[in-house]
Image (cartoon, grey):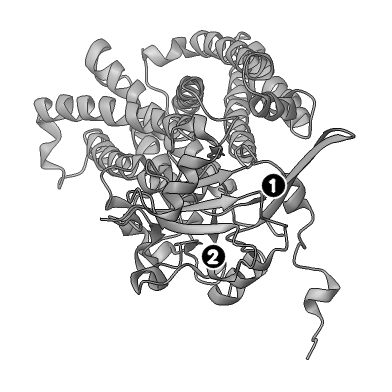
């Protein structure tokens, strides 16, 4: 069984927000819901030693996901291949998962009353395609693949480059890696 | 971007208040029944305890995005919210049946079954303790919410539940007095617990502000000198803790009655502020700046018809 993960190559990301827009259009998200914002970290340092990076954020599909543990209805689930998603009909909108998620990756849909989030475009992945944001990224800064396969592009990128995970100290074991 | 309904709101704080207070009322009644003697507490107080928890449940259901599907919260035994929901249900049922022992009504044929009464008191003690404690446990486990994270919030919530429950027991005893009741000694105990509450909250904020992460320090600063400081200092510390502490030491029923109301006001204020503080997450690099630039939803360009 695959363990899907995403690698963000911050050396290539130019902060164009194409992924944000692509995701919003594909999922028909209202204004207040942004599954994958791209933030700007920096600039840090003093001239001429400055650095800045664009940080594409999304659900980290954590191995030790606090949102799944917090859900009282069993609507938040993690598939065998690691993708965390919400079964809409089971969600009662208690917001426990929103409060439990340290990454702010979940949103309360005011129209349906349920909670929505990035699911790595589960329907596309099940058909062997890549998530829409990955497909859209013209800089190839988003790489999607199987973490358990040592020959996959994501595994190679992580092993061959310096990488970090966000809020690693919380022991959520996120499956989104940032290389720099 | 609108943050409306993206975090828990005031109704959950009110649920925590009523549920915690109701649960702790069961604890007090059970301890008195099991270890001191029966017929010390009025029927009114025994009914008000589970009633408070029922009101709390009502607010919890109203807080849901899909209130008509509230039954689903009982479905995941691994979730602490599910555990809390089951415990609250057991406590409410057990509490009401326990209260029925004091009601002279023919259909309550079990009124003379002393063993059942004591068994229910024991159930009330356990479930009441869980209900009074679990909001603190629920909040303290949130890794990404700097003001809540850690075990100390559990103790503060339990203490506040006990203080408000004792205050409501005292109020019930004033409305429906029970002669020779141990509750007549409550005001001094309440004053001592209020002193402990004031000291523990001051210590909690001082530790959060000085001995933890930057995010936790920032969240505590909101209470010390930020937007929540007036509510904390005036509504909770002065009106909800110190003033009733003094009033409980004055042996005048009017003062003590008013003090109980102030304690309840302090309890609900504390929970409102605590839940509000949970809106502060440990933000990711650049996230706060990013979100501050998003539209709020009322901008003209969003309302204009561009086609």
Give the farthest residue toward the right: A47
Element marked by disc 1: helix
Give the answer, above or below, for where B15 lies relative to A149.
above
> Which quarter of the picture shows residue B231?
top right
Question: Disc number at residue B287?
Answer: 1
Marks 1/2: CA–CA distance: 21 Å
Q: What label sits on residue B230 in the rendered view? A: none
Say whether residue B218 is left or right of residue A88.
Answer: right
Residue A104, given in percent of the width and then of the height, sits at 57, 49
Residue B123 x, y percent position in the rendering: 21, 29
Residue A16: x and y in percent read 73, 63
Residue at image location 71% in from the left, 28% down from the top? B218
Tags 1 and 2 touching, CB below 8 Å: no
Closer to viewer: mark 1 or mark 2: 2
User: B97 and A167: which one is in front?
Assistant: A167
Closest to the observer: B115 or B127? B127
Position of residue B86 relative to residue B65, above or below, is: above
Q: Is residue A6 left or right of residue B113?
A: right
Residue B204 appears in the rendering? yes
Q: Which mark is residue A134?
A: 2
Residue under the image location 59 percent in, 38 percent down: B278
Chain under label 1? B
Residue B8 lies, in percent from the top left, at 55, 48
Could you tell whether B71 is left or right of A102 in the image? left
Q: Quadrant of the C terminus of chain A?
A: top right
Can residue B55 be spotted in the picture? no
Q: Does mark 2 fall on the same chain as mark 1?
A: no
Q: Secondary structure at mark 2?
A: helix
């Amino acid at each position: 069984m695959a363990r899907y993960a995403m690698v963000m190559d911050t050396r290539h990301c130019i902060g164009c927000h194409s992924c944000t827009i692509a995701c919003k259009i594909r999922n028909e998200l209202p204004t207040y819901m942004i599954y994958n914002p791209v933030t700007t970290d920096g600039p840090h340092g003093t001239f001429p030693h400055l650095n800045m990076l664009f940080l594409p954020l999304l659900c980290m599909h954590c191995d030790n996901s606090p949102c799944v543990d917090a859900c009282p209805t069993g609507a938040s689930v993690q598939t065998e291949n690691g993708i965390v998603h919400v079964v809409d009909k089971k969600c009662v909108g208690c917001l426990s998962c929103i409060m439990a998620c340290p990454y702010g990756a979940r949103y309360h849909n005011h129209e349906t009353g349920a909670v929505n989030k990035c699911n790595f475009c589960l329907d596309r992945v099940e058909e062997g395609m890549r998530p829409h944001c990955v497909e859209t990224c013209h800089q190839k800064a988003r790489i999607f693949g199987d973490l358990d396969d040592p020959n996959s592009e994501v595994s190679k990128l992580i092993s061959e480059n310096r990488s970090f995970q966000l809020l690693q100290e919380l022991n959520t074991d996120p499956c989104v890696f940032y290389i720099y | 971007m609108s943050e409306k309904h993206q975090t828990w709101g005031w109704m959950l704080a009110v649920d925590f208040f009523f549920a915690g207070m109701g649960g702790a009322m069961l604890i007090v009644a059970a301890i008195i029944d099991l270890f001191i003697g029966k017929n010390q507490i009025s029927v009114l107080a025994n009914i008000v305890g589970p009633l408070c928890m029922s009101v709390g449940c009502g607010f919890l259901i109203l807080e849901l995005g899909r209130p008509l599907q509230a039954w689903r919260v009982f479905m995941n035994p691994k979730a602490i919210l599910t555990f809390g929901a089951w415990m609250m249900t057991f406590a409410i049922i057990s509490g009401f049946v326990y209260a029925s022992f004091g009601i002279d009504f023919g259909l309550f044929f079990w009124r003379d079954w002393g063993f059942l009464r004591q068994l229910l008191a024991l159930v009330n003690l356990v479930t009441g303790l869980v209900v009074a404690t679990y909001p603190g446990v629920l909040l303290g486990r949130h890794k990404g919410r700097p003001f809540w994270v850690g075990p100390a919030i559990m103790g503060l919530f339990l203490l506040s539940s006990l203080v408000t429950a004792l205050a409501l027991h005292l109020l019930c005893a004033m409305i429906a007095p029970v002669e020779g009741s141990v509750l007549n000694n409550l005001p001094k105990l309440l004053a001592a617990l209020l002193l402990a509450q004031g000291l523990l909250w001051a210590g909690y904020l001082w530790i959060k502000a000085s001995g933890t992460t930057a995010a936790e320090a920032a969240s505590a600063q909101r209470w010390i000198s930020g937007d929540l400081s007036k509510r904390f200092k005036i509504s909770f510390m002065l009106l909800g803790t110190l003033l009733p502490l003094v009033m409980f030491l004055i042996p005048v029923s009017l003062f003590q009655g008013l003090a109980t109301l102030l304690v309840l006001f302090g309890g609900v204020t504390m929970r409102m502020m605590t839940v509000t503080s949970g809106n502060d997450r440990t933000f990711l690099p650049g996230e706060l700046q990013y979100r501050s630039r998003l539209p709020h939803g009322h901008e003209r360009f969003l309302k204009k018809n561009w086609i």
